[in-house]
Amino acid sequence: MAGEFELIKRHFHYPVSHSVLGVGDDAALMQPRPGMQLAVSTDMLVAGRHFFADADPFLLGWKTAAVNISDMAAMGAEPRWITLALALPEADEAWVGAMARGFRDCCEAYCVDWVGGDTTRGPLNLCATIFGEVSPDKAVRRTGADHGDDLWVSGWPGMAALGLAHLQDRLELVSDWREACLERLHRPLPRVALGLALRGVASAMLDVSDGLCGDLSHILEASEVGAILDETLLPLEPLLAACKRTEAATKALLSGGDDYELLFAAPREQRGHVEAIGRHLELPLHRIGRILDKPGLWLQRGDGVAEALQAGGFDHFQTD
Ligand code: ADP
Ligand code: MG
């Protein structure tokens, strides 16, 4: 393997477009725009836990950047700078090069400067820190959901979970849909434009990384409210088309993670505004339920019966 400094020079050293100084010195220099607040978040991907050790390095690099950028989207912040700390057992140069290309491609797609990091020998592990900018008081937190608010989710949550179940031989997917599900799993597209558009519109928001119900419970806890999901409003069509099984599709939607869609609450009077944002971004936005003042989470079934989905009670929807 090339030495640490050679690796850095060859694979991690790119020009920056909106930073004072990028890779190469003891520290990078960034200048936030006047009056903006910094939003900072770190996400680590560990071999064996978050990805298979033989995962495609390009896609792994992409995903490491994407999951960090998604945290900015979820705050309504604009992603601007990122660093990557890397532990490599004995990675070959081709692996490092491909991983760096994936990371860099994702950064470029979202106008993020890769300004630094650290490289060391150790168990395979990628840890990125993202820095974004947000106007004071405009960040969308988890705490603002209020009784009567609509509950929305973007895109088609659950497809990544179907892709994973397929890879693990737990589920057969219709061949026409297989690629789409695997693409969602391997190459998530953080909803940055949506997050920015929802500033001042959404009352609470997060990105779905661990599963829709589990992540929703974070909003409910932080906002001290409850919620009821309407089964008839759940965007199940592509999931049903992909796996042809209602129960597996519902499980994937309610408890599947890895899609990095945005889940948000918005006051009822913003309904038209939210729909207009979806049309403008050509991104489906699904109204899936509403916020209640009493704590707890329910699913209103098609037959009208409300089924409790209390914390710890998601087992019903666990995919394994
Ligand atoms: P130091 O000894 O001061 O920690 P390093 O030798 O670790 O410096 O890093 C030298 C330069 O290379 C720094 O600018 C650092 O940000 C950058 N760098 C190291 N590893 C990475 C990486 N994985 N991604 C991007 N930049 C990196
Ligand atoms: Mg260092």
Image (tube, grey):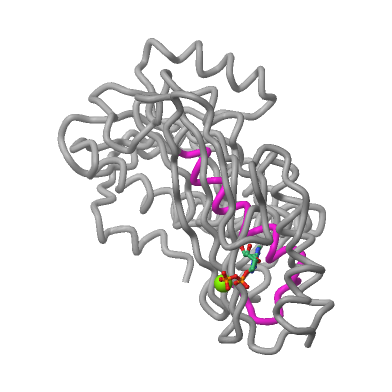
Residue 167, how many percent across, how many down? Answer: 68, 72
Q: Residue furthest left?
A: 294
Q: Residue furthest front?
A: 25
Give me the residue at 74% from left, 67% from top: 99
Which residues lie in the magenta part? 51-74
Give me the residue at 55% from left, 34% from top: 78
Provide the major secondary structure of the magenta segment: helix
Residue 88, how many percent across, how many down? Answer: 64, 82
Q: 37 left or right of 280?
A: left
Give me the residue at 45% from left, 54% from top: 211
Placement of 268 over or under 285, stated as above or below: above
The number of numbered discs placed on residues in the rendered structure image is 0
Image-quadrant location for residue 181: bottom right
Task: Give the position of the N terminus as an image quadrant.
Answer: bottom right
Check residue 84 for magenta coloring. no
Placement of 48 over or under 29, stated as above or below: below
Q: Please tell me which residue lies in front, 5 or 305.
A: 5
Give me the residue at 49% from left, 24% from top: 34
Placement of 227 over or under 58, stated as above or below: above
Q: Please tell me which residue lies in front, 19 or 235.
A: 19
Check residue 70 for magenta coloring. yes
Q: Is residue 18 visible?
A: yes
Residue 69, how many percent across, how many down? Answer: 57, 46
